[in-house]
Image: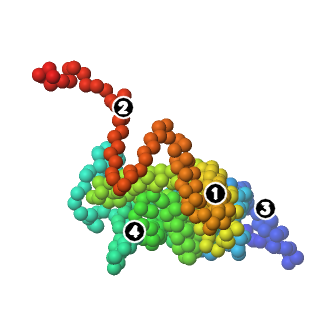
Amino acid sequence: MAHTHEHHSPGQSPDELQAARIDELDPAGQSLTNALRHSFVILKIIMVLLVVLFLFSGVFRVQQNEEALVLQFGKFRGEGESRILRPGLKFAFPEPISEVIRISVKHIQSLAIDSFWYFETEQERLGQAPRRDVTGPLNPLQDGYNLTRNDQQTGQAGADYNIVHSRWVVTYYVRSPVDFFETVYVRPRQPGEDFLDAAAETVEPLLNSLASNAIVSTLVKYSIDDAVRSRTDIAVDVKNTLQRKLDDIGSGLEIDAVRADRIVWPRQVDEAFQASNRARQERSQMETEARSYQERLLTETGGPGAERVLRTLRDANLTQEQQAEEVAKLTGQAQTLIAEARAYRTRVVEEAKANAEYLENLLPEYRKRPELVLQKIYQDAIEEVLAGAEEKILIQPATGGQSREVRVLINRDPQIRRPQPDQQDGSGR
């Protein structure tokens, strides 16, 4: 049996010794050694490639309608506004080191609120069946409703509330991704599931609760007439109230709009409300006609500016000069009547002055010969009276205190027709 002994000089290095050993191996051993060496080199290259691929898998793009947040070990990466990644090419360590949360900002989502609507069957909701006539009382276990203010009537000690049914639609979007993620719980997402789809399971119950509270607290401030006819104004108030509640909890949600889809009175009193509406419409029409008549009458009487002049004249502090100035601004029939009144006043004053002057001139003669003056006045009056008479009959007074009979023959009025023969009686007379 042969034995191999290694002989080397003390001055050889370890590499030289290794090379000497390889030289002493057989060809099979050398092939195995080379294969192992090449395998380790390839393994190193593969590991480097895997590390590079791992790092490059963290490169992602934020789309134009998105904002992104990066969580590293469960905490936000960055501070302040730098935590929000805007559209563009970004990098984050792949999971499980980091987690990228994409949020579609300005993506409008809607939520229907039907909890205040009355009970409907499936066929009624789909419009496949006519609406039922309900005469029984409201069932609070099935029918949703809102309370509205009841205007207190004169003589009443208090005021109750009225009932309406309402349906609402709320549209919203994520305004601040950071506040939203920190405040609103979102369950773990399934692979490939959108963040907002997972968040909707939490957001919708939260939003439904806050919106319902805002609707209840807002409608109670309005009367039933306002609720039915002013849905837009009420929806604005509900939106403002709901937004304040969301801001108070730092939800990061922005209410885009609140729409009152329908607000109606209970079906049980539909006939009474229809009659009330008809009466209200008739009253409104009569008021409109009365205002039109008032405006037309004022315009015809005092001209286009009559209404303004009338309001000014109601001021108790106006002086007579100011009142006269305002009256002078009137036109139309009022100005005509005022002119006629002024002319009549002038005529009466002038006639009174003429009569006074006549009597003043007559007074000296009356003092000298009163009977003659009175007789003259009497004769003048008789002449004035008889001046327009077509026939004059003069009768001398009776003498000796005896009465006198006077007969006046007057011709038959030619306008009176004679009776016809057929109008006589049956005797032929």
> Which residue shows up at 49% across the image and 37% down it?
390
Q: For numbered disc 1, what is the local secondary structure?
A: helix
Quickly name the residue at label 1. Answer: 351
> Which residue shows up at 80% across the image and 66% down it?
20
Q: For numbered disc 3, what is the local secondary structure?
A: helix
Are dots 1 and 4 in contact, CB under 8 Å?
A: no
Are dots 3 and 4 in contact, CB under 8 Å?
A: no
Q: If you read the primary sequence from the N terminus, does the residue marked by circle 2 or circle 1 appear first?
A: 1
**Is the residue marked by circle 4 packed among few (<14), some (14-19), or many (20+) residues within 10 Å?**
many
In this rendered view, identify the residue nearer to me: 10 or 148.
148
Protein image colouring: rainbow
Q: In this picture, is 145 found above or below 291?
A: below
Q: Which amino acid type corresponds to the residue marked 3 in the rendered image?
A: Asp
Q: Which amino acid type corresponds to the residue marked 4 in the rendered image?
A: Thr
Q: Which amino acid type corresponds to the residue marked 2 in the rendered image?
A: Asn
Give the position of the N terminus as an image quadrant: bottom right
- In the picture as drawn, the residue positioned furthest to the right comes out as 11
Q: If you read the primary sequence from the N terminus, does the residue marked by circle 3 or circle 1 appear first?
A: 3
Spatial distance from mark 2 to mark 4, Cα to Cα? Answer: 86 Å
> Which residue shows up at 44% across the image and 51% down it?
285
Q: In this picture, is 61 found above or below 2?
A: above
Residue 188 visible in rendering: no
Q: For numbered disc 4, what is the local secondary structure?
A: strand
Q: For numbered disc 2, what is the local secondary structure?
A: loop
**Is the residue marked by circle 3 packed among few (<14), some (14-19), or many (20+) residues within 10 Å?**
few
Q: If you read the primary sequence from the N terminus, does the residue marked by circle 3 or circle 4 appear first?
A: 3
Q: Which numbered circle lies on residue 411?
A: 2
Residue 321 visible in rendering: yes
Spatial distance from mark 1 to mark 4, Cα to Cα? Answer: 73 Å
Spatial distance from mark 3 to mark 4, Cα to Cα? Answer: 104 Å
